[in-house]
Amino acid sequence: MEYLISKLSMDSDEFLIESIFVSPNEDNKLSNFEQKNRAWLVNCYNGGHSIRGLKKEVDGVWYRNGDFSYDGSYFKWGEKLPKNISKRNVFVSYYHNDDQVKRQEFDNLFGDLIINQSVMLDEIDGENSDEYIHRLINEGYMKDTTVLAVLLGPKTKCRKHVDWEIGGALNRKVGDRYSGLLGIRLPSHPDYGFGDFYTETEYSERLMANINSGYAVVVDWTKNRRELQDAIELAFLRRSEKDKIVNTSIKRLTENLCE
């Protein structure tokens, strides 16, 4: 039997696997993923079963990603896998007209790592910010959101709905706590590939204020599932730094500033 692992977690010293999320490969089809512990993995390997990693590509299809080997003490494998940890409730904010393709790629690559709270294309609208945010909360989209991920293209900065979604996520009335804030610079963004350098005019006032305060996390677009999961976790942990949030002092956009 071949077993395929999509996520795993290590012990505190990062030496030993503690848990995995694994599925048997039956007739080239993945069945139900289950959480298993290290003892199960050792017994499976010693029983002669094949164990391989899994990864996803932008087409949303699972692909094998290297064999697991075991020397009697430690396992070795290829590319880092995402951690086998609790999924975060993630709301994805983006400019629907320009970045719908990247929004779909985000789902294809990372959809199994999060609980998706997002508004899909043309699913909800509002004439003003208060009405829109009220609907986001009361129709369940943002009530339980713990991380707001903003896909940053060149025009995201001037779209009113994105500004409203950021403002709503940083409002204490949304859910039980503030949401973490994660900006993901797409390859189309002028600052993509420039690390910690920020051209302030290429970000909305609200997002830039939270970058400058140290509350927002910003990363470049990646297909690496572990890197993106780590970024979501960092944004999630930043919620404890609520004093850094800049929100109520910034006026919401009342119109789109670009087409």
Image: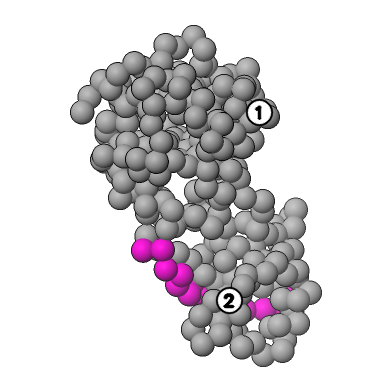
The tag earlier along the polypeptide, 2 or 1, is: 2
Element at label 1: loop
Q: Name the residue under label 2.
A: 31
Residue 116: x %, y % from top left: 52, 47
Q: Can residue 110 be seen in this view?
A: yes
Q: In which quarter of the image is the N terminus?
A: bottom right
Count of numbered marks: 2
Q: Residue furthest left?
A: 259
Relative depth, front residue between 33 and 216:
33
Q: In which quarter of the image is the C terminus?
A: top left
Q: Start and end of the magenta stretch?
A: 59-73
Task: Indicate yes or no whether the magenta region holds residue 121.
Answer: no
Mark 2 falls on what kind of element? Answer: loop
Q: Where is residue 44 in the image (x, y as percent from the top left)?
A: 71, 82
Is residue 166 placed above or below 228 in the rendered structure?
A: above
Q: Which amino acid does label 2 sit on?
A: Ser
Q: Which residue lies under the disc numbered 1?
A: 177
> Going 66% across and 53% down the picture, which residue do you hit?
85
Q: Residue shown at 64%/66% (left/top)? A: 21
Q: In this view, does 247 lie above or below 165?
A: above
Which three-letter amino acid code belongs to the residue tagged 1? Answer: Arg
